[in-house]
Image (cartoon, rainbow, N blue to C red):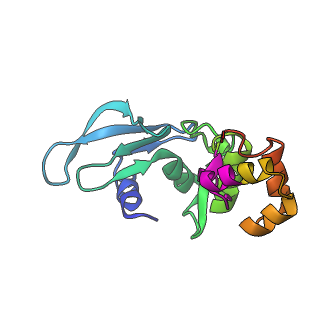
């Protein structure tokens, strides 16, 4: 568990925050002195937004805490090393416990790609072996009627990669 999350759960134990399965966290007490004294206050929903994720600063001493992680830990225990929390429907601000699941980083990335949260094309794609400059050269070589087999060998890629470029399936955004 991260340092800021540990600090958060210490404050939950003291009644400063209340955590709910509907994905909401409320501050119910506020600090009144520089020492650790708190007084009751009107409950306030903690819901700042960062890249679509709900988070908030615990205080000046700690960095942001992410609500989806806090909800998971509160109801299910610590997140094991190498695993992370996935939003099942890809809605980053939907932190209901029923919408969260534990996955590996790879599973999280594949899920995001599958549902369209990651729309990488060209060089920014995680599996890209070619640069846009390479693709321009390939398109020129195809215009010169060089074989796809030769071009594939030259660039150390599959013939399928060259075929995808030739017929506009891949790299169609790169124009000569």
Outermost top residue: 42
User: Does the rendering let one see residue 101?
Assistant: no
Q: Is residue 30 left or right of residue 70?
A: left
Residue that extends furthest to the left in the rendered view of this protein: 34
Which x, y percent locates residue 80? 58, 68
Q: Position of residue 53 (x, y in %)?
A: 49, 41
Does residue 56 appear left or right of residue 75 in this picture? left
Report the front residue among 134 and 115. Answer: 134
Task: Say how many tags the image has.
Answer: 0
Kindly identify the residue that appears in the image at 67 percent across and 54 percent down. Answer: 137
Q: Is residue 136 magenta?
A: yes
Residue closest to the eye, 85 or 121? 121
Magenta run includes residue 145: no
Q: Residue at x 74, y 45 (%)?
A: 114
Residue 169 position (above or below residue 13): above
- Seen at 79% across and 62% down, the residue is 151
- Magenta part of the protein: which range? 120-137
Residue placed farthest to the front in the image? 144
| Closest to the observer, 36 or 113 | 113
């Amino acid at each position: 568990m991260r340092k800021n999350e540990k600090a958060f759960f210490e404050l939950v134990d003291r009644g400063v925050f209340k955590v709910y399965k509907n994905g909401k966290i409320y501050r119910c007490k506020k600090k009144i002195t520089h020492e650790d004294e708190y007084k009751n206050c009107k409950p306030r929903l903690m819901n700042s937004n960062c890249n679509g994720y709900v988070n908030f600063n615990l205080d000046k001493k700690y960095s942001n805490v992410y609500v989806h992680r806090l909800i998971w830990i509160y109801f299910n225990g610590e997140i094991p090393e190498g695993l992370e929390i996935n939003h099942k429907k890809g809605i980053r601000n939907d932190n209901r416990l029923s919408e969260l699941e534990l996955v590996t980083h790879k599973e999280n990335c594949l899920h995001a790609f599958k549902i369209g949260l990651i729309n990488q094309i060209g060089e920014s794609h995680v599996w890209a072996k070619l640069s846009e400059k390479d693709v321009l050269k390939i398109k020129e070589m195809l215009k010169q009627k060089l074989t796809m087999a030769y071009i594939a060998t030259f660039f150390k890629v599959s013939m399928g990669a060259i075929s995808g470029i030739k017929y506009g399936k891949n790299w169609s955004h790169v124009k000569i």
